[in-house]
Image: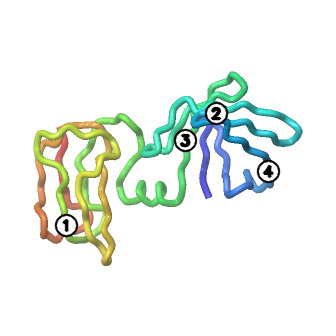
């Protein structure tokens, strides 16, 4: 299940081939890496993937000559926001805090490193699962507040950014 936002205003609930509870039947033909041809409801659509950012789950599509900005949000994105990770590609990085109690098993950056939103920066083990924590925005690592092998509590600052 995804919430799909088009041009920042229209939101659709998409689950498989169902959109807002209505089943959509479509024939999709991949023409090449960026181009698709779609037939649905007796209409034909030529779709070009102009830009795709898998990390931010955003894309720009050109459908029959009209551009659309599209973003996807699933239940995991909502959970990450509840844990204190916001969205917003290209935003300046805020301090990275532990979203849950756990054990630091790897620090992948050093002070002075430049990071982009979505870059992996630290690995935290919680409930026997490894969780790769990513930079919340673009920035420069100011300081590492923890080290490998340290147990942390939820909300503890792990990395500070400039």
> Real-space Cα distance between discs 1 and 2?
42 Å
Q: Earlier in the sequence, mark 1 or mark 4?
A: 4
Residue bearing mark 2 = 35
Q: Earlier in the sequence, mark 1 or mark 2?
A: 2
> Real-space Cα distance between discs 2 and 4?
20 Å
Coloring scheme used: rainbow
Q: Nearer the viewer, mark 3 or mark 1?
A: 1
Residue bearing mark 4 = 24
Residue 71 is tagged as 3
Determine the secondary structure under disc 1. Answer: strand
Please state the total of marks drawn on the protein image: 4
153 or 136: nearer the viewer = 136
Q: Earlier in the sequence, mark 3 or mark 2?
A: 2
Residue 160, position as x, y percentages in the image: 17, 47
Which residue corresponds to the image point at 42% horizontal and 54% vertical from the top-left?
Answer: 81
Q: Residues within 10 Å of mark 2 (few under 14, many from 20)?
A: some
Determine the secondary structure under disc 3. Answer: strand
Which residue corresponds to the image point at 20% horizontal and 37% vertical from the top-left?
Answer: 114
Residue 105 is tagged as 1
> Real-space Cα distance between discs 3 and 4?
20 Å
Q: Earlier in the sequence, mark 2 or mark 4?
A: 4
Q: Earlier in the sequence, mark 3 or mark 1?
A: 3
The image quarter in which residue 162 lies: top left
Q: Nearer the viewer, mark 1 or mark 2?
A: 2
Determine the secondary structure under disc 2. Answer: strand
Question: Does the image show residue 7?
Answer: no
> Real-space Cα distance between discs 1 and 4?
45 Å
Residue 111, position as x, y percentages in the image: 11, 44
Residue 97, position as x, y percentages in the image: 25, 56
Determine the secondary structure under disc 4. Answer: loop
Q: Residues at badges 3 and 1 in contact (C-beta under 8 Å)?
A: no
Residue 95 is tagged as none
């Amino acid at each position: 299940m995804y919430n799909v936002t088009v041009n920042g205003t229209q939101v659709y609930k998409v689950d498989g081939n169902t959109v807002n509870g209505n089943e959509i039947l479509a024939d999709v033909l991949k023409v090449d890496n960026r181009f698709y041809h779609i037939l649905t409801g007796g209409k034909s659509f030529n779709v070009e993937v102009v830009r795709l950012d898998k990390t931010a789950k955003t894309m720009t599509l050109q459908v029959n000559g009209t551009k659309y900005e599209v973003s996807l949000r699933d239940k995991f994105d909502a959970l990450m926001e509840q844990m204190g990770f916001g969205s917003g590609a290209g935003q300046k990085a805020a301090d990275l805090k532990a979203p849950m109690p756990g054990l630091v098993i790897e620090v992948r950056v050093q002070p002075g490193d430049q990071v982009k939103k979505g870059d992996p920066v630290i690995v935290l083990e919680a409930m026997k699962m490894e969780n790769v924590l990513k930079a919340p925005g673009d920035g420069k690592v100011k300081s590492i507040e923890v080290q490998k092998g340290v147990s942390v509590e939820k909300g503890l600052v792990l990395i500070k950014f400039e």
